[in-house]
Amino acid sequence: MKKLITVLMLVFVALIVAACGGQTPSSAAQPAPAKTAPTAASEGLQGKKTLIAYFTYSGTTERAAQDAQKIIGGDLFKIATVNPYPSAYRECTEVAKAEMQNDARPALQGTLPDKQNYDVIFIGYPIWWHQAPMAVFSFIEKSNLSGKTVVLFCTSGGSDISETLPKLHDALNKKNAKVIDGITVNRPQGIDEWLNKLGYKK
């Protein structure tokens, strides 16, 4: 009789626990997955009016922009300063460093493209002192980018694009642009692989 009562009590306790809906670690709510950067396929970028703007010093970024254009199409625009940077590498790095320390905005040559003619704007640049050159910020701040999709890419011998993103994001957010982070192009086929992942096809 005592055994029967004990069994009935255990069943009763189990029913109370089940009714309370107690959670185990495996059933607890899991954190939401991290958001991934949108792709051209999901954003429908391919086929839209596109501008590929780039700043180049040695020609490496210009070649990357030209390679991208072969796949993307669109128009190319070279971001160039009124006062050219010194051709001597060491002297150029000193000028670039001084500009960054002063948060300078060097004047740009010519008339900037009318951004109203474009839906998507790629911006390419070399990495100088772990940042985008100040000429890129001149371009951003003088451009109407509200509602535009901006895709970033860079060239570098060793640094990664991630180092440059905080300041660029800050500048682009102020212009109400939608940003898609790109890659650091360190090899010729890098552009093709990246754009294919974004949904662009030749």
Image (cartoon, grey):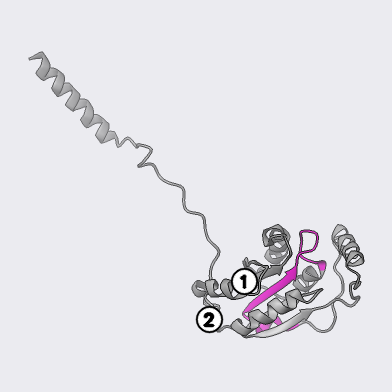
Using the rendered view, name the quadrant where residue 25 is placed. Answer: top left
Residue 120 lies in magenta, yes or no? yes
Relative to 49, is 92 above or below?
above
Relative to 58, is 35 above or below?
above
Left or right of residue 73: residue 92: right
Left or right of residue 26: residue 41: right
- Residue extent of the magenta highlight: 113-134
Circle count? 2
- Residue position marked by numbered label 2 in the rendering: 201
Residue 192: where, in percent of width, then height? 59, 76
Going by the numbered disc 1, the residue's amino acid type is: Gly
- Viewer-closest of 177 and 45: 45
Residue 135 seen by the camera:
yes
User: Residue drawn 69% across and 66% down?
Assistant: 172
User: Residue drawn 69% across and 76% down?
Assistant: 64
Using the rendered view, name the quadrant where residue 78 is placed. Answer: bottom right
Going by the numbered disc 2, the residue's amino acid type is: Lys
Label 1–label 2 contact, CB within 8 A:
no
Secondary structure at badge 1 equals helix
Secondary structure at badge 2 equals loop
- Residue position marked by numbered label 1 in the rendering: 190
Task: For the N terminus, give its image quadrant.
Answer: top left
Instruction: Say the numbered circle drawn on residue 123.
Output: none
Residue 169: where, in percent of width, then height? 68, 62
How crowded pointer 2 is (Cα within 10 Å; few <14, some 14-19, many 20+) is rated as: few
Decide which of tag 1 and tag 2 comes sooner along the chain.
1
Nearer the camera: disc 1 or disc 2: 1
Relative to 12, is 200 above or below?
below
